[in-house]
Amino acid sequence: MKRIAATALALGCLAATSAWAALKPGDTAPVFTARAALDGKEFAFSMADALKKGPVVLYFFPKAFTTGCTAEAHEFAEAADQFKALGATLIGMSGDDIGTLQKFSTQACSGKFPVAADPDLKVIKAYDSALIRIGSMGYADRISYVIAPDGKIAYAFSDRSPDKHVENTMAAVRRLQKK
């Protein structure tokens, strides 16, 4: 009981603070491969391969099937075709295991875009997007990046509220396409 209360208190305190993306525009985006799921099917996502096709919208979220993360996934799913029309690859990432994300990719993402598993937080830490680790569970902060095909961060947005991530990354992709 004490552990649950301590976890709730820690997460509550973190939610009350501001979040800031540590990687800034112009920084080189870490290249990675990760186990991912699209519409329930597992595959290997390669950042290097995705960048060959155009910009990548990589968004980190704390935990699948929580209220904010599910709402954010629904919003990204609704905008997935627009991102695709702009030539952008969309992918979400969390510290959840691949089994959880296989379900999340169908239920919350509507099979519209993949979500990648990073239970060891290696990629999350490389993008300076780690929020907290409690016991064996690790959580990403809510940060969205737009990565240009040259591998540089074109845009970073950090806000624990899921409300503006889709709108802001879409605008950043449009600006990038105009260049």
Image (spheres, grey):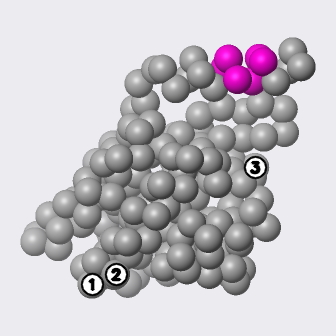
Q: Is residue 74 magenta?
A: no
Point out the image quarter for the N terminus: top right
Q: Is residue 8 magenta?
A: yes
Residue marked by disc 3: 120
Answer left or right for 12 relative to 118.
left
Q: Earlier in the sequence, mark 3 or mark 1?
A: 1
Residue marked by disc 2: 81
- Indicate the amino acid at tag 3: Asp
Residue marked by disc 1: 85
Give whichever of 156, 151 is nearer the camera.
156
Q: Residues within 10 Å of mark 3 (few under 14, many from 20)?
A: some
**Percent position of residue 107, x then y:** 62, 70
**Percent position of residue 176, x then y:** 19, 66
User: Answer yes or no: do the residues labelled 1 and 2 have beta carbons within 8 Å?
Assistant: yes
Mark pair 2, 3: CA separation: 31 Å
**Percent position of residue 28, x then y:** 40, 54
Residue that appears at 68% across and 17% down: 9
